[in-house]
Amino acid sequence: MAGGFNFWPGYLINNKYLSNMDPMATISDQLRQAIAAAAKVGISRYRISQKTGVEQSALSRFVHGKQGLDLSSIDRLAAFLELQLVKTPRSEKGR
């Protein structure tokens, strides 16, 4: 992924629109899923962009996996989408 942060698995994003998230998915992938889930309940990427201050073009590049986001943008997206970062327990195999 170009620029931004490539998050490691082992953290799970929780929010009211998501269920059954894969704890081995990266935080970036989970955030993309949260944005897609928001769209399914009528929250467009345009609205997300307007409410968070994350440029619509940057949001589009992120959603399509072409660019990462800085932590400030991730924080604003997480706050708007009501996301919570939760550490998941490691399996015995992963230790």
Image (cartoon, helix red, strand yellow):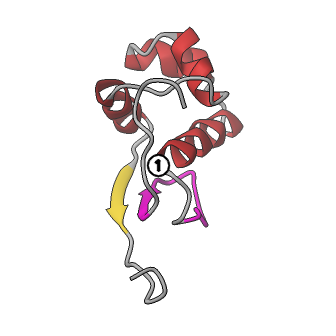
Q: Does the magenta run of residues contain 20?
A: yes
Seen in the image, is 46 located left or right of residue 77?
right
Q: Amino acid at mark 1?
A: Ile
Q: Is residue 58 above or below residue 88?
A: above
Q: Position of residue 79 (x, y in %)?
A: 34, 36
> Which residue is the site of mark 1?
27
Q: Secondary structure at mark 1?
A: helix
Residue drawn where x is 35% and y is 25% of the image: 70
Quadrant where the C terminus sits is bottom left
Residue at coordinates 45% horizontally, 40% vertically from top-left?
A: 6
Name the residue furthest right: 40
Give the x, y percent position of residue 54. Answer: 43, 16
How many residues crowd mark 1 within 10 Å: few (<14), some (14–19), many (20+)? Answer: many
Return the residue found at the far bottom. 92
Q: Quadrant of residue 40?
A: top right
Left or right of residue 28, residue 86 in this image = left
| Left or right of residue 23: residue 73 | left
Magenta stretch bounds: 10-22
Where residue 60 sits, quadrant-wise, is: top right
Given residues 54 and 51, the one toward you in this image is: 54
| Residue at 57%, 45% in the rendered image | 29
Is 64 placed above or below 47 here? Answer: below
The image quadrant of residue 77 is top left
Nearer to me, 59 or 4 = 4
Residue 83 percent coordinates (x, y): 40, 47
Q: Residue 90 in the image: x percent, y percent?
A: 40, 79
What secondary structure predominates along the stretch shown in magenta?
loop
Q: Give the residue displayed 34% in from the left and 62% down from the top.
A: 86
